[in-house]
Amino acid sequence: MNIKGCIFDLDGVVVDTAKYHFLAWKKLGQELGFDFTEQDNERLKGVSRMRSLDILLEIGGLSLTEEEKVAAATKKNEWYLEYIKQMKPEEILPGVLDFFKSLKEAGIKIALGSASKNAVLILNILDIKGYFDVIVDGNSVSKAKPDPEVFLQGAEKLGLTAEECVVFEDAEAGVEAAKNGGMRCVGIGEPAVLSKADVVVDGFNAFTIENLKQL
Ligand code: BG6
Ligand code: MG
């Protein structure tokens, strides 16, 4: 089937915000009295803010009331925003902008499919919102990845079927979401982690529009 649309995850695919999420969660862990490692942070990739907090608390062996959880997630997000407000367009991952440009030239539509509620803010900070025909983010979905809702909404808003779209993802839950939605998926990262993807590459310098057409 001809590819008419590409749907991109944001964190870890377009920009490396995972390091900022990590720093903010680590700070929250410290405040709550336990250490949170980079390895632990892998479990939070692609996962919603509140679910991430639950995982963090599980790692720390703590339980909080709903009210305390909302306060903790708000605090983490405020720290995270301090980091991302200082991001520069140079932090866009290598090859991403050239890939976007070649999609535009080929008439292939571009959508964002992100779990983040900060997605539009990040696109504006990086000055790349204009590349996206459609944006679906953590504010518009009710079911988190691996549920395919975010990508199915993206395809629908592009006016395309799932079969006409390809998803780009760096998280295991995100690859599963794409496959659950009946879409082809390019994994960005480690083949061992993203084994359910149709192909796995380590970044857009290793993936061109010619590779896309061969999927
Ligand atoms: C995903 C990230 O894109 O967004 C997760 O991979 C993050 O790590 C999630 O928790 C929610 O992000 P935000 O910006 O709404 O807290
Ligand atoms: Mg991601």
Image (spheres, rainbow, N blue to C red):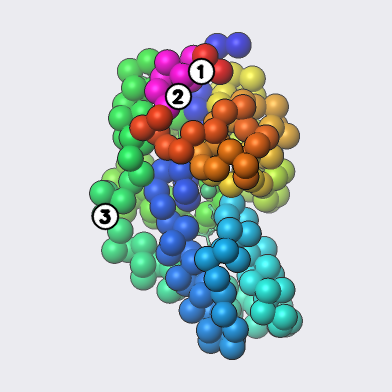
Does residue 136 sit above or below 19 in this rendering? Answer: above
Q: Residues within 10 Å of mark 2 (few under 14, many from 20)?
A: many
Return the mark for residue 210: none
Which badge, 2 or 1, comes first in the chain's sequence? 1
Q: Circle 3 — which element?
A: loop
Observer-nearest of 131 and 44: 44
Query: How far apart are labels 2 and 1 at the CA level?
Result: 6 Å
Query: How far apart are labels 3 and 1 at the CA level?
Result: 30 Å
* Left or right: 63 in relation to 74: right
Specify the quadrant that holds the C terminus. Answer: top right
Disc 3 target residue: 88
Residue 37 in sight from this viewpoint: yes
Instruction: Identify which amino acid the numbered label 3 is placed on.
Output: Lys
Residue 175, how many percent across, how many down? Answer: 63, 39
Q: Residue furthest front?
A: 192
Q: Is residue 22 magenta?
A: no
Instruction: Identify which amino acid the numbered label 1 is placed on.
Output: Lys
Does residue 7 sit above or below 70 in this rendering? Answer: above
Which badge, 2 or 3, comes first in the chain's sequence? 3
At a point 67% along the width and 79% down the height, the residue shown is 60
Query: How far apart are labels 2 and 3 at the CA level?
Result: 25 Å
Disc 1 target residue: 4
Return the mark for residue 109: 2
Observer-nearest of 101 and 12: 12
Q: Circle 1 — which element?
A: loop
At a point 71% along the width and 74% down the height, the residue shown is 58
Residue 55, how many percent across, how many down? Answer: 68, 68
Which residues make up the magenta segment?
Answer: 207-213
Residue 66, how many percent across, how many down? Answer: 71, 78
Q: Are marks 2 and 1 in contact (CB under 8 Å)?
A: yes
Residue 113 in sight from this viewpoint: no
